[in-house]
Image (tube, helix red, strand yellow):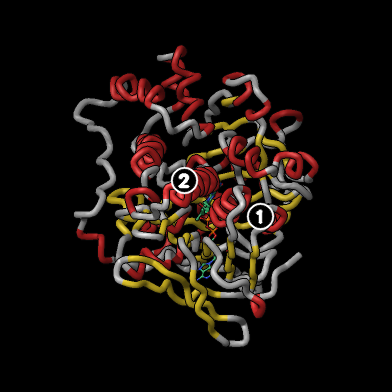
Amino acid sequence: MRASASNLASHPDVVVIGGGPAGSTVSALIAQRGYRVQLFERERFPRFHIGESLIPETYWVLERLGMLDKLRESHFVKKYSVQFINANGKQSAPFYFWDNKAHQCSQTWQVVRSEFDLMMLNNAREHGVEAHEGVRVRDVLFEGPRAVGVRIQRADGSQQDVQARVIVDASGQSGLLQNKFKLRVWDPVLNKGAIWTYWQGAYRDTGRDEGATLVLQTANRQGWFWYIPLHDDRVSVGVVAPFDYLFKGRVSHEQTYQDEVDCCPAVKDRVSAGRRVTGYFATKVYSYRATQVAGDAWVLVGDAFGFLDPLYSSGVLLALRSGEMAADAIVEGFQLGDVSAAQLGKWGPVFNQGVDRMRRLVCEYYDGFSFGQFVRTYPHLRGTITDLLIGDLFTDRVDSVWPPMESLYPEGKAPPPPWDSGTSPQHTQNKANELILPEGHRP
Ligand SMILES: Cc1cc2nc3c(=O)[nH]c(=O)nc-3n(C[C@H](O)[C@H](O)[C@H](O)COP(=O)(O)OP(=O)(O)OC[C@H]3O[C@@H](n4cnc5c(N)ncnc54)[C@H](O)[C@@H]3O)c2cc1C
């Protein structure tokens, strides 16, 4: 049942800003422990969102959320592998997750996010979360350094202050608190853009390959395409390339997309039998992170904390894992009577290390890393590199891949520069990545 924003229970324990995967996760896991949670989402669901390919390590959080049976009963396409196709059209062998881990977690899903996000939000409601749609959080309220509540605005323009013991910012790329405190640090190297559309009747593999994510490099090596088969015979096909290359001095998103398809015969062949069923979506995809995950009585989760280039489809996993880690820290904080920045943000260093590992794999790909060459040279590391691809990021066991990877560098090449946590001059640029929807498409 949907809660009414005009009838707010006073003083919940936790207020969550945003009802995407991060907000639904953190709120459901806190409510499971008996605390009162109110969530405010500015849109009305279902609403469009990009980010359709899940990776296997989402399984463990989805299990805690009680979402697995719902996903199994859904019509979402089952995903068993990821496969890379290089600029010459040469395919790596698929990385089958099951071969690496013979467990049901090795099958995941390609989801339509409007449907998946609604399932997640309704699941949070089933756990007792009072979730209000069409209610925007205008500001987080502070007494000194400590967050004490939020100011909400309903669709009719009326405003109200809601107090809570902890505020979780899960507002996605709009990053309410990141902007308020200028916490956003742009990644020094990952500054891309993306253009995508949806096809019906385009090529699909069969059997366990039907739901594979394909990553296809363009012939000029400037960018890559994602090819994500969805249900109802649709395929999401998008190109990612340096922002300036994709958007500066170009005629239109449509023309640029067509040019890039022409530059990638493996995509051109696959979509040729299909019919385009939407217009062209576009966005800046600059990676970023905040300089801190938490303050006194507030915490950031999902894209409201950080966003990583979509190459390996890690965004929803990072939203779920940060939501989970934050929920555990908040519940423990309530039990200890401690909602300080140190308590609420204790998961930050481990989480950042995990993101750093995925980030390094992203940078290596853009720097010419070849999965095929790597597994041919180091076949015993195929499992470990697959661990990274499935999102098993929060363990130093996977760090054994880096020295062998460096051994394949051409002379003079150095490892990618690390993300800089606060001293970067880019610190002050706070304009978020902005999604451009095709004409007539409802957000
Ligand atoms: C081009 C591209 C491709 C991607 N591909 C993938 C992929 O294949 N797989 C993958 O896992 N990830 C992918 N991602 C990343 C993924 O989309 C995000 O990481 C994920 O959606 C983050 O979830 P979230 O809950 O943090 O934020 P969101 O899903 O953005 O949710 C935030 C919510 O907060 C609401 N909100 C914002 N401000 C307010 C406010 N003031 N008051 C109330 N509500 C508010 C918004 O309406 C929104 O519903 C991709 C991203 C891009 C840009």
Establish if 216 lies above or below 340: above
Residue at image point 40% right, 22% down: 397
Residue at 80 percent across and 42 percent down: it is 73
Q: As drawn, is 274 to the left or to the right of 164?
A: right
Q: Nearer the viewer, residue 366 or 288?
A: 288
Kind of residue sitting beneath label 1: Ala
> Residue 31: image x %, image y %?
61, 53
Q: Which residue is mark 1?
A: 124
What residue sits 73% from the left and 43% below the top?
A: 71
* Residue type, numbered disc 2: Glu
Residue located at (57% from left, 26% from top): 95
Q: Check disc 2 and report the residue beneath it.
A: 332
Viewer-nearest residue: 12 or 183: 12
Q: CA distance from mark 2 to mark 1?
A: 20 Å
Residue neighbourhood size for the residue with mark 1, other residues' Cα within 10 Å, grouped as few (<14), some (14–19), many (≥20): many
Q: Nearer the viewer, residue 365 or 219?
A: 365
Label 2 neighbour load within 10 Å: few <14, some 14-19, many 20+: some
Q: Quadrant of residue 105?
A: top right
Q: Position of residue 156 (x, y in %)?
A: 62, 87
Q: In the rendered view, tell whether residue 375 sits above or below residue 272.
A: above
88 vs 2, nearest the viewer: 2
